Amino acid sequence: MLRYSIRRLLTMIPTLIAISVIVFVIIQLPPGDYLESHIATMQAQGESIDQKKIAFLREQYGLDQPMWKQYLDWAFGFMQGDLGYSFEYDMPVNDVIGDRMFLTILISVVTIVFTWLIAFPIGIYSATHQYSWGDYGLTFIGFIGLATPNFLLALVMLYFANVYFGTSIGGLMDPRFIDEPMSSEKLFSILEHLWIPVIVIGTSGTAAMIRRLRANLLDELGKQYVTTGKAKGLPPGKLLRKYPLRMALNFFVADIGNLLPSIISGAEVTAVVLSLPTTGPLLIASLQSQDMYLAGSFLMFLAILTVLGMLVSDLLLAVLDPRIRLQGSISK
Amino acid sequence: MNEPIISVRNLRVSFEMATGEIEVLKGVDFDIEKASTIALVGESGSGKSVTAQAIMGILPATARITSGEIIFRDPQSESITEISTLSQDDPALRKIRGGKISIIFQEPMVALSPLHTIGDQISEALFLHQETSRSEGLSRTEAMLDLVGFPNPSRALRTYPFELSGGLRQRAMIAMALVCRPALLIADEPTTALDVTVQAQILNLIRDLQQDLKMALLLITHDLGVVANMAEELVVMYHGKVVESGSAKDLFENPRHPYLSALFKAVPRFGMDKDDRLVPVRPIDQKLGAHFQRKLAIKSQSNALLKVSGLSKRFTIRSGGFLTKAPSSNIQAVDDVSFEIAQGECLGLVGESGCGKTTLSKMLMRALSPDSGRIQYRGPNGPIDILSLEGSDLMAMRKKMQLIFQDPFSSLSPRMTVFDIVREPFVIHNEGDLEAQRDLVQELMQLVGLDPRFLNRYPHSFSGGQRQRISIARALALQPELLICDEPVSALDVSIQAQVLNLLKDLKDELGLTYLFISHNLAVIDYIADRIAVMHRGRIVEIAPRSELFSNPTHPYTQSLLHAVPHPDISRPLDFNTINALGGNDPERWPAVFRFEVGESARWIDLGNQHHVRAHAI
């Protein structure tokens, strides 16, 4: 198990290096750089540009260096926690992202927990009461959740939250707390606003998870080892928990790897509609304006989350499933 | 007072289907006496397993006992429980289930949870039914594992099912069923999924344990050989009814019901004469059409149609990731195999699962490439080297050799009609227009005894035997010379086996075909083959004409196989001591002259009479 974990950790390194190269190359692919598009915008607006200043900036940011050197500077900086400089915001990327990253992770984690808390009992109920009225009813609601566009749900929720609870529209906190240091009132305001994006972003994921959990559990319930357990005289609840549910967990755990990045990058539209101060909208903007260090840092964060998610689910799978844990070292 | 422990009276069970209610048990009656062995015999679908499930109270959710009763008398407490009236989750029934009556299933791999250790799964039954401390429970589990023959019981407690061989898994399953010392053990096809030498060990084990524990045994099987060796009493089921019951001795000597006597005539057994024919329970009518009436002239025996020499194939199993240097291990699937098949001959290839039979057949078909060796096929201008064929030459060669698969369910596409399935070879090889193809397909259907009106149906509407005949029709479409039959009857019921075997036998004569017939069942091989090659762990260890092999088996593995086959004859019981002494499939226990290192080249000893054995000396 230890060897497996170490091996698994080591394989992450080349994966991340490869991703960082690809990310950097893709960002550099469009012709020109941030300064060039900046100059073009300025000239279009009839403003004059000091060529000296441009040359200075170019040198300052290393844009006159060959691409491989730029990459190495960025990559080594990244490893030391220096994410580079955002041209658009005229401040270090660390400062641009900082607060947003925290809020994004907060929303994501709460959404994941929300999804699990709702999906798990419903999925189990649906599978164990297949074709009952309860199963049909929950399935129906699930499909509605799956089919409703997120942005529409977001608008509806905003309206009701404002009308009935008096919550300010949009954002993750009351406007007066923005840029304020963290306080208990600010935290309360965040929690007050948090449930809307959590429900909006979580519904479709919940519905999909119910369907998958139901299908997986149904598969397992039909397997013969369940009959064996029953033939041993196990009471139904214990039988369900010990055997088929444990097997169905496998898929659940395997899903964690996909969950982390998809929630961050998949909720952009919702984030724009709800004007959430999360990272999604920032990523889109930075890609549009060729703000390369900001965009690069974002994409790398996504990549790291994906790789980390995969690591977590792989390690958990190895803990849960002896076949994965042991078969690696058994030569059959 | 000797009351039966189980009385089944007029039991009727129905299944709720989308099309309505189907009655699968139509009034079943029988008793199980204390410490007796009773065998429930019948073909698949006759209701054997449903009867067992009803006794255990584990019928599927769609099934329902409509009338009748099942009464259980606990031989210890003399208390009486009416199982048929209790709901499945009733605590009284749960106490009996696993505690007083337990069951073992056919496929130990799927019947055990892959995520829990053997020790956990076995001791669970104990903790459920008996008041024991954890440490005492585990030591009793360990003792049980020892009793069922685990070489290292304390280690076995912590192993997972996938780490064990099929035989050991079934032993674990038996330990699980017996750990509470039940009054009745139900064994639902306990050895059908096992190799014949392992089957003999498991049967022996069940019988010994039954005597030790003084329990009754309800054995469910379709294998009359197993029945003859185990059962004292016989209950024969047919279409949900008990058609005959009585002592095994009487029924074997004097079967009265036509179904049972038909079953006896349908089972291949050792020592049948060359001209003896099996009588299928449901005979088929096949007809030779004009197109296929092309009897190939049978050449002399010396002219080999297919010649295989020094064929080897090794599989490498990688276990490392893409960074670490993989500590790979090798499996020698086929090891230096050589043989010849003469035209018009049927060469039987016998061996246990995993011995390389199927790998060999795939290499002959060019579906896998061997590491070394030659495969030569007789051509008009001298032998053709099959392994070097490419492009159109290979296509032309493919028409001469065809394959019939084991599993008639997965080998036919469920999305194609029978017409499309049988026609496909013509389409692939671009032969004839649709009209001509339709004629040929109809003729092929008659050739395998199927009604050409079935052509528009899909495979799911056919039984296993009918599907296998569709497979045969497809294989015959291009008028091949050589058919490779890979376990063609192993997935079929005994009553259907005879039908397909006879069909294959007739087609061989009528069309002048040559067969390579692969099977693990010696009795089947004996019925159809002219010569037999015995394969063990990738090597052919003995090859001889049929009668020679059976009268004079020389290799210890061949001898083990021959002794381990249960005969459907009550006067020829298995001799467990001899089987054990012969060493079975474990080369370590063979005499030294028969042991070879991996990769050591074959050394054949000619015993005359075309009989060869792999040994250093005799």
Image (spheres, coloured by chain):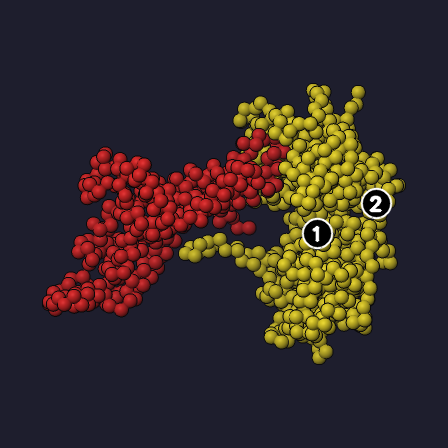
Percent across and percent down for residue B86 are 66, 27
- Local crowd at mark 2 within 10 Å, few (<14), some, or many (≥20)? some
Percent across and percent down for residue B606 are 75, 62
Drawing shade for chain A: red
- Seen from the viewer's position, the closer of residues A198 and A153 is A153
- Seen from the viewer's position, the closer of residues B435 and A91 is B435
What amino acid is found at the position of numbered circle 1 in the picture? Ala
Drawing shade for chain B: yellow
- Seen from the viewer's position, the closer of residues B226 and A42 is A42
Tell me the tag on residue B491. Answer: 1
The residue drawn where x is 49% and y is 40% is A138
Q: Is residue B592 visible?
A: no
Q: Quadrant of residue B191?
A: top right
Secondary structure under the numbered disc 1 in the rendered image: loop
Indicate the chain on which mark 2 is placed. Answer: B
Indicate the chain on which mark 1 is placed. Answer: B
- Local crowd at mark 1 within 10 Å, few (<14), some, or many (≥20)? some
Residue B462 position (above or below residue A142): below
Q: Seen in the image, is B185 located left or right of residue A236?
A: right
| Residue wearing tag 2 | B259
What amino acid is found at the position of numbered circle 2 in the picture? Tyr
The residue drawn where x is 28% and y is 65% is A28
**Residue at the front extreme?**
A163
Tell me the tag on residue B340. Answer: none
The residue drawn where x is 28% and y is 47% is A276
Percent across and percent down for residue A142 are 47, 43
**Residue at the bottom extreme?**
B381
- Seen from the viewer's position, the closer of residues A161 and A176 is A161
Q: Seen in the image, is B219 located left or right of residue B97?
A: right
Percent across and percent down for residue B508 are 79, 64
